[in-house]
């Protein structure tokens, strides 16, 4: 009987300890004058939740499970405060922020088991924000990263298809993750790119070097962690609208994002993109058949042409890549030639796009002259 009572007591104690909750409260003040900072952000990275300070500079988080978390307190114009805290009961942490105009080091979760400061990570990691991507002139997300991050390149087979290369390794030696889900399609074949809407990307973490311990044996070259959902503070909703244009092909890209964090802890992020180009909606292109339009897109994106839009014997490549019969390819090309989209040299059988440089302007003007 005594053993039974003791066992029940131990089970009750272990259960209570496992489900113990706690909270963090305190006050955030200015180090120079001691005044409270109103609206400072208090964020727990592992839980992706937090709160903001009130009119008197005080804050209190909701009930959170016991554990160890990386706590970040930030306020515009001040150096951020980072501290690893152990939560097993309600506790008070007062924070004093120093005025600063220098951006604090980033926090990363790629390559490690939990959130950690970027400078303390043993792996070589680069963090790219959405503002950095918007300032880049890349045609897609991987092309933009190759222009921003040293050691990252892109294997491109057209304006829309780029595969990541990290320190010379690519394909199934580089892992691409989108919001925790592995993107396997880009690892096989030259014509398979990243299946991600680049307009939805909020942050990218790039791990350069082996990452087999956390991501598997195929992470030999590195990891590209693409994050589209960046949670907002509790009780806040945000909306963003982004538009981009391209004069070469009349592209108009629209992206709308709506995210929020309810008081009950429910977090959501909704986004959608719509792209349209005057090239494909022009009267000439609308008059083409579906096969002719598919061939036109194939010529603009396939890797078998030169920088001048010249293709050597494209019929065979099109038959193989599109899995079409020779008669179907021949009829499609005949329609493109009749509409003036492309011309064919009857002697060499080479094909060239008539307005290639109008739609794909070269970076070097001498290329167009040659």
Image (spheres, rainbow, N blue to C red):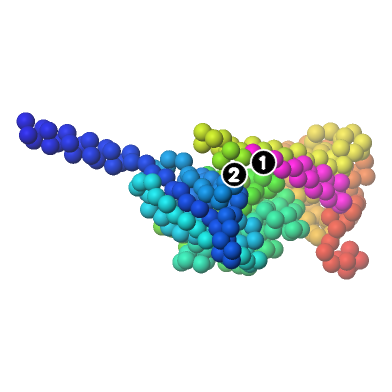
Quarter of the image containing the N terminus? top left
Q: Is residue 116 above or below residue 19?
A: below
Q: Position of residue 103 (x, y in %)?
A: 62, 64
Residue at x 89% of width, y 54% of height:
358
Q: In the rendered image, which quarter is residue 154 located in?
A: bottom right
Q: CA distance from mark 2 to mark 1?
A: 8 Å
Q: Residues within 10 Å of mark 2 (few under 14, many from 20)?
A: many
- Judge whether residue 316 is colored magenta: no
Q: Nearer the viewer, residue 228 or 53?
A: 53
Q: Is residue 347 left or right of residue 178?
A: right
Residue 10 percent coordinates (x, y):
18, 39
Q: Quadrant of residue 243?
A: top right
Position of 71 relative to 364 (above/below): above
Q: Please give the name of the residue rendered at 87% of the width and 34% of the height, measured from the top-left corner.
A: 286
Could you tell me if the residues under marks 2 and 1 are in contact, i.e. CB atoms within 8 Å?
A: yes
Asked whether residue 249 appears in the rendered view, the answer is: yes
Front residue of 196 and 63: 63
Q: Which residue is mark 2?
A: 232
Secondary element type, mark 2: loop
Taking the spot 91% from the left edge, 66% from the top edge, the residue there is 369
Q: Which residues are magenta?
A: 237-255
Q: Nearer the viewer, residue 165 or 123?
A: 123
Q: Residue 188's spot in the image, x, y percent?
A: 58, 50
* Residue holding disc 1: 238
Most distant residue in the top direction: 1
Q: How many marks?
A: 2
Instruction: Give the x, y percent position of residue 172.
Output: 53, 54
């Amino acid at each position: 009987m005594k053993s039974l009572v003791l066992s029940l007591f131990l089970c009750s104690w272990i259960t209570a300890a496992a489900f113990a909750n706690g909270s963090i409260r305190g006050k955030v003040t200015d180090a120079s004058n001691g005044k409270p900072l109103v609206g400072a952000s208090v964020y727990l990275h592992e839980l992706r939740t937090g709160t903001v300070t009130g009119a008197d500079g005080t804050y209190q988080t909701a009930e959170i499970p016991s554990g160890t978390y990386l706590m970040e307190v930030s306020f515009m114009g001040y150096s951020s405060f980072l501290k690893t805290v152990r939560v097993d009961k309600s506790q008070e942490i007062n924070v004093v922020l120093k005025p600063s105009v220098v951006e604090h080091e980033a926090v990363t979760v790629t390559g490690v088991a939990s959130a950690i400061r970027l400078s303390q990570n043993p792996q070589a990691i680069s963090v790219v924000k959405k503002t950095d991507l918007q300032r880049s002139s890349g045609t897609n997300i991987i092309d933009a990263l190759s222009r921003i991050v040293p050691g990252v390149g892109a294997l491109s087979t057209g304006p829309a298809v780029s595969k990541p290369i990290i320190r010379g390794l690519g394909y199934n030696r580089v892992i691409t993750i989108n919001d925790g889900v592995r993107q396997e399609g880009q690892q096989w074949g030259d014509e398979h790119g990243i299946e991600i809407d680049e307009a939805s990307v909020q942050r990218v973490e790039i791990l350069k070097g082996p990452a087999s311990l956390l991501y598997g044996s195929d992470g030999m070259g590195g990891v590209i962690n693409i994050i589209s959902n960046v949670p907002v503070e509790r009780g806040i909703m945000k909306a963003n609208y982004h538009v981009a244009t391209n004069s070469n092909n009349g592209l108009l890209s629209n992206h709308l994002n709506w995210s929020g964090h309810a008081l009950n802890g429910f977090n959501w992020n909704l986004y959608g993109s719509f792209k349209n180009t005057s090239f494909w909606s022009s009267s000439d292109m609308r008059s083409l058949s579906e096969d002719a339009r598919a061939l036109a897109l194939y010529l603009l994106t396939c890797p078998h042409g030169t920088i001048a839009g010249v293709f050597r014997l494209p019929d065979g490549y099109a038959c193989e890549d599109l899995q079409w019969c020779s008669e179907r390819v021949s009829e499609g090309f005949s329609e493109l030639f009749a509409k003036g989209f492309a011309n064919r040299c009857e002697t060499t059988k080479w094909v060239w796009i008539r307005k290639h440089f109008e739609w794909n302007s070269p970076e070097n003007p001498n290329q167009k002259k040659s």
